Image (cartoon, rainbow, N blue to C red):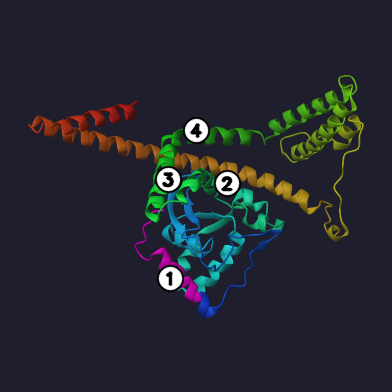
Amino acid sequence: MKTTAPGMSVKAFTAMLDQRTKWFGRTAGRAMCGESQWTAARETSKQANKLDEEGVEIAVCRHGFLLKGLNMSRGEIFAYPMFLQKEFQDAAFLSMDVTCCYVPYLEKVSEILTHLQPLQKIRHCLSVMHAKAHNTKCEILWNAGNQEGAGTTLGEEVEKLNSFLSRCALTTKYMSKSVRTDMLTVHAIGWNQRKENGLHIAFVFQIQKGNAAASSVDARGLQISIEALFVSICQKKHYLYRQNDRNKRRQKIPQKIAKEKKRLLDEIQRYNQQPDGDPVDTHSVVQKLSNKAAESMIWPCEEQNTDGVDILAKKKLSDQLMLVLRLTEEKQILVKEMMQHCQYLKDSVAKVQTLIATISDCIKTGSKCKSNYMALCTLKFIGQTIFT
C-alpha cells in the first residue's frame, strides 16, 4: 500500500534493525505465550522465494479508519509495526496481538538506537480477542480492558479491515506491483469514505451501547436479572416432564438449567457486593431450587488465601470492576471525539461556502464557462446536503 516516509523508508528502517541484531544479537524473547506459538512475534525473517510481498501491515484508529499501511516483504516481523509506531508517536495507546513479546523487543532496541526511545512513551495493550489465547498472567497485565484511559476499545479494528481487504487476494496475487498497490489503495479509500459517512451514527450507537452496558451492572439491573433467572429455572423444572415426552428432548433441559443456575449464583454474588442493595442469602436460594450448586474447587496450592476464594473468582470480580471503569472512561472519550467531529464538519461547511462565493464572483465578472457553472452547481448541491 502507498505510504510516505519523510525520514526513512521501510526498507532502510528494516535494514537498520537487522544491523543492530547482527552486532548485538537477538533479544531474549520467545514467540510463545501460553499454549500458542505466535507467528507475528518474530524478530527476523527471510524473504520468501516466490513472493514479492507477503501481505500488508496497517495502522488503524479505534473507529476503524485506515491511517497508514506498508507492504511486508519478509513476513510479520517486529520492524514493520515499529516503523508504523514511529510515524504516530503522538498516539496514546498501541494495541497488538503480540504486545507481551513486542514490548521487550522495543526496550532492547531503544537501548542501542536512542532516537527510538520516544516510542516507549506510548502505552501498549493486548487486543481483547487475542488476549484470550495468552496465559492468564499476560492477559491480566496487558488486556485492553485493564488499561486506564483505554475506554472500551477492543483493539480488533485491524481484523475488520483485514477481512474487508482479503476479498482482493484472489485477484491481486496475479497483478503487477503497481497495479496491486493501486487496487488496495482504492479499496482502502472506499473503506475510509464509508467510515466517514457513518461516523456520526457510530458515535450514537456507542453512546447507547455504553449506557445499556452501564445500566446492566447497577443494583436494579442485577435485581431484575436475578428474578428473571430464578423464575426461568423454576419454570423449566416444572415443565420438564409435562411438556417433553421424549428423553432426547429432556436431556437438553437439565443442561440449560445448570447453566442458568450457575449464572444465577454469579449474579447474586455480584448483587451482594453492591453497597445500596439488601444482601441475598445464597443458601436459601439453593434450597428453594432443591439442588446443590456446583462449588469451585480450592486446590492445596491456594490454601494460603485466607479469604478462601480462588484466583479465577477474583479475576471475574476484577473484570467486572474494570468494565465499569472502562465504561465511565468511554463516555468521556466519546463526548470529546464527537465535539472534534462536529468542529470538523463546521470547518468543512465554511470551506464549501467560501469556494461557492469565489466561483460565483468569477461568473459575475464574465468568466462564464461551462466548467465553472457545473462546479458551482456541484458545490451548491454539496452545501445543501451538508446543511440539511
Residue nearest the viewer, comparing 19 with 380: 19
Q: Residues within 10 Å of mark 4 (few under 14, many from 20)?
A: few
Disc number lying in front (1 or 3):
3
- Provide residue 133's location: percent of width, then percent of height: 68, 53
Whole-angstrom CA distance, mark 3 to mark 4, is 24 Å
Which circle's residue, 2 or 3, is located before the other in the chain?
2
The residue type indicated by label 4 comes to: Val
Note whether 28 is above or below 83 in the view shown: below
Q: Where are the magenta residues, as a range? A: 1-20
Q: Can residue 145 be seen from the camera position used here? A: no
Which circle's residue, 4 or 1, is located before the other in the chain?
1
The residue type indicated by label 1 comes to: His
Whole-angstrom CA distance, mark 4 to mark 1, is 41 Å
Instruction: Return the mark for residue 154.
Output: 2
Q: Residues within 10 Å of mark 3 (few under 14, many from 20)?
A: many
Residue shown at 81% from the left, 28% from the top: 230
- Callout 1: helix, strand or loop? helix
Q: Where does label 1 land, which residue?
A: 115
Q: Where does label 3 land, which residue?
A: 188
- Callout 4: helix, strand or loop? helix
Note whether 363 is above or below 127 in the view shown: above
Which circle's residue, 1 or 2, is located before the other in the chain?
1
